[in-house]
Image (cartoon, rainbow, N blue to C red):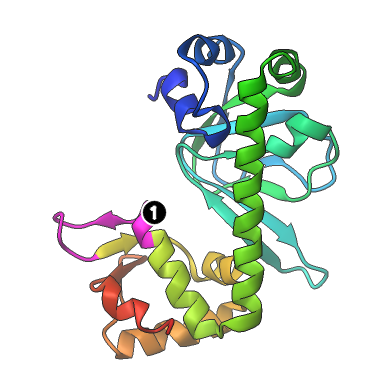
């Protein structure tokens, strides 16, 4: 299991902190365990904690009026969520749901504020992390407006492969365990359109399916789908 100090150093808002500061924050963390499908928090609930993932995955989703969902992010070990609640204490802006059994550390807002208010380095680290989140949101909106479903799907598969994908044998195909429903939510499309585009990619030998996973043999070939 990852030591809390190591995990904290992987979180952008804490990355530039001194070692003694990291130890101080680590002492404030509380461990949580979620089963698959458990809700970490819901849209509209009062926010009071930052959560850092030790093991497992959490998806951040927004529910649509027709009962569907848009997946804003799928977070893996080393990722974090709920940072806005640490700063403003306002209601959550999305749901957070465990994709599989997930272990996390939680940092309470009151504990965080008592630490950060007297630490200029921490303040700058927080602002930098929030800026990166906003840039990712801008990139997503740009993709939705200017790229078709085929290009958005190819771009997301490449992003997942380079970020969280497992490569078989070191130089074999990338293996992604992600559902078509989750892919649809990530790129702002329907499950049916993702299923259609995956069939096209299979016909072109750009992806294959095996035991519930998507295999990508050649990332460079897939990148040409975006151009």
The answer to whether one can see residue 214 in this image is: yes
Front residue (pair 40, 218): 218
Instruction: Determine the residue positioned at 45% across, 38% down.
Output: 77
Query: 10 Å neighbourhood of mark 1: few (<14), some, or many (≥20)?
Result: few
The answer to whether one can see residue 177 in this image is: no
Q: Position of residue 119 (x, y in %)?
A: 67, 16
Q: Is residue 200 above or below residue 213?
A: below
Q: Position of residue 110 (x, y in %)?
A: 77, 17
| Magenta residues (range) | 161-173
Front residue (pair 123, 86): 123
Relative to 28, is 89 on the left or the right? right
Q: Secondary structure at mark 1?
A: helix
Q: What residue would you read off at disc 1?
A: 163
Q: Is residue 24 above or below residue 90?
A: above
State which quadrant residue 157 falls in: bottom left
Q: Is residue 9 above or below residue 198?
A: above
Instruction: Determine the residue positioned at 50% across, 11% down.
Output: 23
Front residue (pair 103, 127): 127
């Amino acid at each position: 299991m990852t030591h809390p100090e190591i995990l904290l150093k992987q979180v952008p808002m804490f990355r530039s902190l001194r070692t003694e500061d990291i130890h101080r924050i680590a002492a404030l963390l509380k461990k949580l365990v979620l089963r698959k499908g458990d809700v970490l928090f819901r849209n509209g609930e009062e926010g009071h904690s930052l959560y850092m993932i030790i093991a497992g995955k959490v998806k951040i989703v927004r529910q649509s009026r027709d009962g569907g969902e848009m997946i804003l992010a799928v977070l893996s070990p080393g990722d974090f969520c709920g940072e806005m609640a640490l700063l403003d204490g306002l209601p959550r802006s999305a749901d957070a749901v465990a994709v599989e059994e997930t272990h996390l550390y939680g940092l309470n807002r009151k504990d965080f504020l008592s630490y950060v208010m007297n630490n200029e380095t921490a303040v700058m680290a927080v602002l930098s992390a929030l800026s990166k989140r906003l840039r990712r949101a801008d990139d997503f909106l740009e993709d939705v407006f200017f790229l078709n479903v085929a290009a958005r799907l190819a771009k997301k598969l490449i992003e997942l492969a380079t970020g969280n994908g497992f490569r078989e044998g070191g130089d074999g195909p990338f293996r992604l365990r992600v559902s078509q429903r989750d892919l649809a939510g990530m790129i702002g499309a329907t499950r049916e359109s993702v299923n259609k585009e995956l069939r096209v990619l299979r016909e072109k030998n750009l992806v294959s399916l095996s035991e519930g996973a998507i295999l990508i043999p050649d990332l460079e070939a897939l990148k040409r789908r975006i151009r």
